[in-house]
Amino acid sequence: MMEYDDIRASVRKLCEEFPGEYWRKLDRDMAYPQGFVDALTQSGFLAALIPAEYGGSGLPLSAAAAILEEIQASGCNGASCHAQMYVMGTVLRHGSEAQKQKYLPGVASGAVRLQAFGVTEPGSGTDTTSIRTFARRDGDRYFINGQKIWTSRAEYSDLMVLLARTTPREEVLKRTDGLSVFIVDMREARKRGLTIRPIRTMMNHSTTELFFDNVEVPAENLIGEEGRGFRYILSGMNAERLLIASECVGDAKWFIAKASAYAKERKVFGRAIGQNQGIQFPLAKAYANMRAAELMVREGLRKYEAGEDCGAEANMAKMLAADASFEAANAAIQTHGGFGFAEEFDIERKFRETRLYQVAPISTNLILSYLAEHVLGLPRSY
Ligand SMILES: Cc1cc2nc3c(=O)[nH]c(=O)nc-3n(C[C@H](O)[C@H](O)[C@H](O)COP(=O)(O)OP(=O)(O)OC[C@H]3O[C@@H](n4cnc5c(N)ncnc54)[C@H](O)[C@@H]3O)c2cc1C
């Protein structure tokens, strides 16, 4: 079920149009890969998960995983647009029919971009239920005040899925209650109260911080029921983790292929460096770890698509794949010697890009805590 050979071949073909120099130039200018995202949209890949009745191809999550993995394995960077795949799931699973009719066909055709997901705040970090951004209802509108950080692609998105408090934390029985999810039309919001400030990071990621000053959102943009938003966000997280894990597997494949090719061709002391076990073993080990991560991703996808609980597998897949991609990145730099640091080899750029996934969208420690608590039955540590 997971092979999708035709889709993979088409993604690879598309990615050939966006070689290393394309990404290098963007990286230097910290610019958004608009041409690449447009090509993916036009080819329908970004609408893989949108049901056919709303203009997408209605494919299962494993197809989206295959698409993102191939993008990374081709040396491109899906981080510029991957959010559309999982953010859209929140609208699809919990949105009303009217919301789906209104937004999904535009997202599928590319007329409307749904790339931004506003959860993290500077004051709360991983502790999502302590967010302070507040949406106050007044008649048929909500007024939003607060701040978000690390809202990636906000400048290149028309819509954002936003998590905000609608009942203060002190007034709810469970800290997970009283949070709500909204579709925010950023085109409107930017004219009235929403300020977006880019944050420069070690890789080109178009991430930003957002300031909401009485931003008005129609009540019809509330997704599902008021106060139940945390559950809606949680239900999308397994999909997000499995997709990011697939990207990391793709990155690891790219690093290993690139380093193996170089090791065969680079001659030092009159022989290929790849003849040395000191060069071979780190690559072989990275390969084994990549394959193990890939199998865990597949197991997570299998359970997800069977409607089973895949929380543990999605988390493990994300952790193992992020570790495997970074291990492969490190081995690729070592294999390339000094050239590993040169821009034109693309290794250092991909190295910086893949490092992110040990922190976002969830950091390794929190995955380990999840496994300790929910799989091993150990006491919650925080
Ligand atoms: C480039 C980038 C893009 C991002 N894009 C988005 C986005 O589009 N939308 C969005 O909402 N968010 C986004 N994020 C935010 C990302 O999800 C968070 O950075 C991540 O969840 C970690 O939160 P934090 O940075 O606040 O770290 P903190 O929560 O402050 O944690 C700092 C460190 O402490 C550790 N730690 C915290 N609590 C514990 C504990 N109980 N036990 C053990 N260790 C602990 C963490 O593991 C971490 O290593 C992005 C982040 C980055 C860097």
Image (spheres, rainbow, N blue to C red):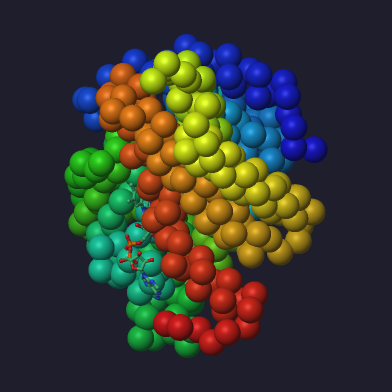
Quadrant of the image containing the C terminus: bottom left
For this view, does 66 lie left or right of residue 152? right
For this view, does 88 lie left or right of residue 30? right
- Tell me which residue sits at (28%, 55%) in the image: 149
Rendering quarter of residue 208:
top left
- Tell me which residue sits at (31%, 24%) in the image: 339
- Tell me which residue sits at (42%, 60%) in the image: 363
Residue at the outermost front position: 269
**Which x, y percent locates residue 300?**
69, 53
Quadrant of the image containing the N terminus: top right
50, 28: nearer the viewer: 28
User: Above or below — where is 158 with respect to 189?
Assistant: above
Residue at the outermost top position: 17
Rendering quarter of residue 224:
bottom right
5, 130: nearer the viewer: 5
Quick check: which quadrant has ligand 1?
Answer: bottom left
Observer able to see residue 257:
yes
User: Above or below — where is 295 with respect to 135?
Assistant: above
**Which x, y percent locates residue 123?**
25, 68
User: Above or below — where is 82 with respect to 381?
Assistant: above
Rendering quarter of residue 68:
top right
**Which x, y percent locates residue 26?**
29, 23
